[in-house]
Image (cartoon, helix red, strand yellow):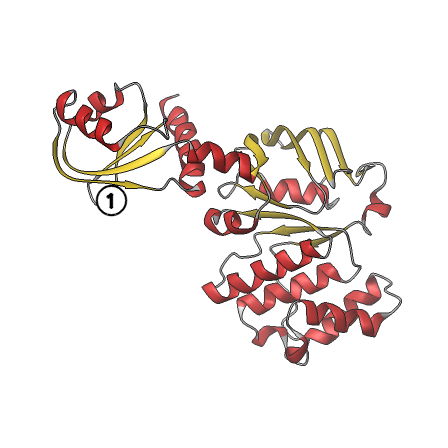
């Protein structure tokens, strides 16, 4: 099956600042591709390049086989873009979508507007002014706008930013339904736990560089190959880290030791004995815990930040 997006050796500079540094990504068709990274990592720049809003310095960017640079006009029918932007407050939902549909030269205008409003759960609110809507409702208006031309690809920049829990749940369910209908979704976010719930594929970007990408199942399997333990008491962290199966040992906000190990088959008894006998730890509390995608992401970023601070 043809990939929805193929990015090869893409770089983008803002003056002397390199926002994207030779990145390559492949987004499979009918996937939810979670594009993860902290603010300023390069997520929005990548999406603006895909949407044809930014020129890039080098590399290749293809949407369903068509190069963005050489076929910008034909690209417009292939994607819908939900940027992090303000909508016109004084427009009613229905009027805003009608104006936008005219700009897209939508032929069956009324039925199209009705259909996209129903898909995102806004039909009953169609006569409300956008300025009176909640943040979640406004995001659904933006999503409806991105769907007007029925594009096969949706490029969504932080669609859950600032939403309350109910609003986030509604958006995530809409996205899952759209993929079931055959859409491909590129979803940027720094809310890792929520992307983990729906993504089929993932990439982590930091300071314009891709740190990791692949199928969510493969990345999750790697995470599940590790185990985490919470320990209360007193011990020498440097001696803990000297154990050959230790990935990390840190102190959390409750002054507990958080120990991550590599071997999923490592027994709790072995770690406990090594801490007591080899580390000479004074243990008051000991329990196991799950390693999450969010922790995996933070660990990747934390290691780089530590290297930058020491440089």
Q: Nearer the viewer, residue 201 or 125?
A: 201
Q: Is residue 56 visible?
A: no
Residue at mark 1: 253
In the rendered image, residue 150, in percent from the top left (x then y), is placed at 78, 58
**Of residues 266 and 73, which is closer to you in this image?**
266
Left or right side of 20 for 147: right
Q: Residue at x 51, y 47 (%)?
A: 196
What residue is at 19 percent from the left and 30 percent from the top? 272
Residue 260 point in image, percent of width and height = 32, 32
Graded by Cα atoms within 10 Å as few (under 14), some (14 to 19) or many (20 or more), the crowding at tag 1 reads few
Q: Is residue 305 above or below residue 40?
A: above
Q: Residue furthest right?
A: 107
Q: Taking 108 as reference, is 210 left or right?
A: left
Residue 25, above or below 168: above
Residue 227: tell me if it is visible.
Answer: yes
Mark 1 residue element? loop
* Location of the N terminus (image quadrant): top right
| Residue ID at (69%, 72%) | 118
Q: Quadrant of the C terminus?
A: top left
State the residue in front, 130 or 219.
Answer: 219
| Tally of numbered discs | 1
Residue 255 in the image: state x and y as whole percent. 19, 41
User: Image quarter for residue 100?
Assistant: bottom right
Task: Provide residue 98's location: percent of width, then percent of height.
Answer: 78, 71
Quadrant of residue 296 within the rendered picture: top left
């Amino acid at each position: 099956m043809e990939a929805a997006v193929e990015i090869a050796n893409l770089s983008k500079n803002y003056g002397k600042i390199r926002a994207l540094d030779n990145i390559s990504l492949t987004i499979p068709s009918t996937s939810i591709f979670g594009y993860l990274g902290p603010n300023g990592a390069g997520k929005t720049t990548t999406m603006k390049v895909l949407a044809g809003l930014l020129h890039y310095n080098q590399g290749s960017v293809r949407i369903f086989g068509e190069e963005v640079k050489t076929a910008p006009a034909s690209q417009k029918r292939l994607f819908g873009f939900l940027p992090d932007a303000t909508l016109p407050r004084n427009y009613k939902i229905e009027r805003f979508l009608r104006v936008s549909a005219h700009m897209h030269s939508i032929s069956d205008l009324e039925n199209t507007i009705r259909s996209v409003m129903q898909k995102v759960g806004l039909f009953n609110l169609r006569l409300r002014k956008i300025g009176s809507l909640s943040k979640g409702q406004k995001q659904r208006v933006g999503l409806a706008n991105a769907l007007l031309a029925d594009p096969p690809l949706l490029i969504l920049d932080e669609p859950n930013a600032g939403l309350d829990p109910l609003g986030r749940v509604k958006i995530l369910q809409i996205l899952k339904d759209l993929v079931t209908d055959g859409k491909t979704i590129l979803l940027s976010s720094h809310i890792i736990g929520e992307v983990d719930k729906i993504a089929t594929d993932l990439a982590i970007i930091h300071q314009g560089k891709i740190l990791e990408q692949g199928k969510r199942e493969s990345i999750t399997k790697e995470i599940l190959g590790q185990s985490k333990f919470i320990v209360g008491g007193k011990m020498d962290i440097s001696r803990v880290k000297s154990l050959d199966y230790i990935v990390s040992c840190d102190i959390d906000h409750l002054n507990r030791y958080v120990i991550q190990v590599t071997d999923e088959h490592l027994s709790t008894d072995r770690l406990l004995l090594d801490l007591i006998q080899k580390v000479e730890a004074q243990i008051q509390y000991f329990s196991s815990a799950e390693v999450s995608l969010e922790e995996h992401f933070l660990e990747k970023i934390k290691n780089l930040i530590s290297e930058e601070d020491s440089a």
